[in-house]
Amino acid sequence: MKKKEEALDINGIIKDIKSNTDKNLYGPLFIKLINGLRPDKYQNAVEKMTLIVNRSKDDKAFESAMENLFIYLFNTQDSQSLFTSVGVLTGETFFTEFSKKMNAKFLPPLPDKRSMNYLLEQAFNKYDDYKWVDSIPNNLWIDFFMLAVKALNKENAPVRKYLINALNILSYRVSSLGLDDDLSSQLRNQNEFISPFIELNKQIQSFLFVAGNESSSDEIIIASGDKVRMLVAKCETIIEDIKRSTLTFGTSLRQTYLLQRNEEQLQRIRILLRFLTPGEIPEKAMDNSVNLFKSIIKSICKRNSLSDLFRNTTTLLAYQIAEHKSESGEHYITTTRSEYTSFFYSAAGGGVIIAFAAMLKALIHSVHMLPFWQSFLFGLNYAIAFVLIFITGASLATKQPAMTASALASSLDARKGSVSLEGLSIMFAKVWRSQFASFIGNLIIVFPLAYILSFSWDKITGHSLLATKKECLQALRDQNPLTSLAWLYACITGVALFISGIISGYFDNKTIYSNFSARMKEHTGLKKIFQREKLNHLSDYLQANLGGIIGNVVLGFMLGYATLIGQFFGIPFDIRHITISTAYFAFGLEGLKMYVSHWDIIWTFVGVIGIGFFNFLLSFSLAFYVAIRSRNVRVTQLPKVAVLITRYFFKHPLDFVFPPKNDRKPSEVFSKKNLHMT
């Protein structure tokens, strides 16, 4: 009964529209119509829209009333800003757009109550309205908006003036963006880059002159519109070329913002051109117009969303950062047994460096100094150790996840064609066993070497490396999950590892984008200090490695200052890094001369393994999430990958620990036909 009443409510709206004779009520009736279309527990939006569309086809009086409603609204509501600003980035830079949205959250701008924007904001006033709008198939929206065609086709109608003004404004905006140095500098032949954007503006002015001339035939207007389309296509091709060139030349936040803004405005020009060209309104051209409408409604609903601004304008920059991390991550993935063995030895080398770094930290801790400067020395010690590991080619288990996650996500990149999910599962096994080799290589050296260093220090100096028995016991209990927040602190460390990976990728991209190496080679002051050959070698080395060095320095100081931050704010904030925790496990055992309960040893061991797990889990998960988001990968495909990985593990479990003699092929592991991402 209630569902029938709801249907009658829609019928009531239809009746109100049919019987209305007061043009001043068209605005409220449109808002009422949209409210009626909004889904509820009785009917979804598709059912309601179907009812409206069918009624307009069967009831000529209702069809005529709807046409009159649209004609009035389009011709009385200023829609110029709707086409030039809504759903299109308008700020000069990312930060001006951010500032505008932030200000609007606290003090919304004064609305223009005569604009189409205001009417749509009043009608689609729920934050999630765009979801049900998107759920309605395009063909239903086309039928709905075909009722408005008469308003758009009438010559000298105010709505055509708004469309002409909007197209004119967008043409100047696009041409000015086309001359921006951040865009043009990426192409070698600047003249070829500038020309289409300048010509587009000229051709649009020509089109508007022809379209506004009453003596112009439809054929002339259509021919002029075709020339505009050709130039729009050239401009879009240039934007795609710039995006592809960023893999070689890098990118910046400003450039990604300008590319996004330019692309949106070119798409909007295409839509406006259809409305102003004779014969372009039919159903085949309306499909893209409906997509425009859906994007406008989404923009209205999320007009002050900062998260959307970040997501939409930083995708390319995030992709570049993830791509550089991916290239680094490939060095952490082993395929052959010889690569696996070499990687194990490099991890052992990393274990040696960390054992000495842990010893230095213990010695710094024994010196009484102000907390800030002690934390600074902790950070400096870590930074030197991490940079030393990086430049010597050694490896650290916890540095891998942020890099290998990006490399793994790279194989899901839709930009690189069809992807075999089974091949991805085999890649995961390679990542897993490489991570295993790295953990074992680090820990098999760190523990015994740290024990030997502590023992040697005691014998040489007559003092324990950890000053008192209490400190030795605390070194064990700091890693014990029953007596400390070790695993929470391990998660914090995982976040720090992820951030350092992002920083590394950012500066790798920055050095390429800013021509760092070439600029160093031409630096007047450096030429006086270094010989040409040495300067070339230094600049090329920094070009390739500066991101990794900066990322490791930042990681060192993040870990060094963590304890001080926790103490300063009085919150449980600290770090636990598996290799350093393993070293302190050894220091504590040696300092206590092994006089400690078996339960303390067992739980400390469990704690250290858990620390490694949470270090890995957080850094890998965050890096993988960023990587797949930057590549527009569909998350719905990931459960399929998990199933395939499980099948692979049960069939060849040793592959997750040690490489097979010959590299596995998907056909060897999976009997079914390869799955491909579409």
Image (spheres, rainbow, N blue to C red):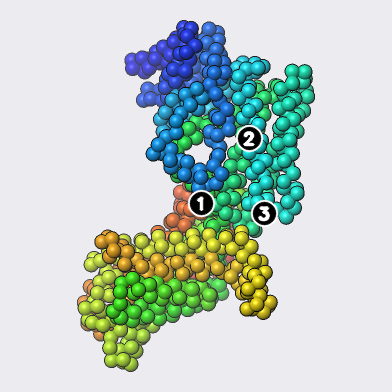
Q: Amino acid at mark 3?
A: Gln
Which numbered disc, 2 or 3, marks the residue that appears first in the sequence? 2
Please name whichever residue, 439 or 460, is drawn nearer the observer in this view of the structure: 460
Q: Is residue 144 visible?
A: no
Mark 1 sits on what residue? 628
Real-space Cα distance between discs 1 and 2? 33 Å
Please name whichever residue, 456 or 643, is drawn nearer the observer in this view of the structure: 456
Residue at 63% x, 28% y is 165
Give neighbour class at mark 2: few <14, some 14-19, many 20+ (Cα, 10 Å): many
Q: Amino acid at mark 1?
A: Ile
Q: Position of residue 559 (x, y in %)?
A: 38, 68
Q: Give the numbered dot on residue 401.
A: none
Q: Quadrant of the N terminus?
A: top left
Q: Amino acid at mark 2?
A: Leu
Please name whichever residue, 492 or 594, is drawn nearer the observer in this view of the structure: 492
Please name whichever residue, 504 or 395, is drawn nearer the observer in this view of the structure: 504
Which numbered disc, 1 or 2, marks the residue that appears first in the sequence? 2
Residue 339 in which image quadrant: bottom right
Does 414 sit above or below residue 497? Answer: above
Q: Position of residue 240 (x, y in %)?
A: 66, 47
Q: Is residue 102 visible?
A: yes
Which numbered disc, 1 or 3, marks the residue that appears first in the sequence? 3
Give neighbour class at mark 3: few <14, some 14-19, many 20+ (Cα, 10 Å): many
Q: Are marks 2 and 3 in contact (CB under 8 Å)?
A: no
Mark 3 sits on what residue? 186
Residue 554 as seen in the image, left or right of residue 277: left
The secondary element bearing badge 2 is classed as helix
Q: Give the numbered dot on residue 170.
A: 2
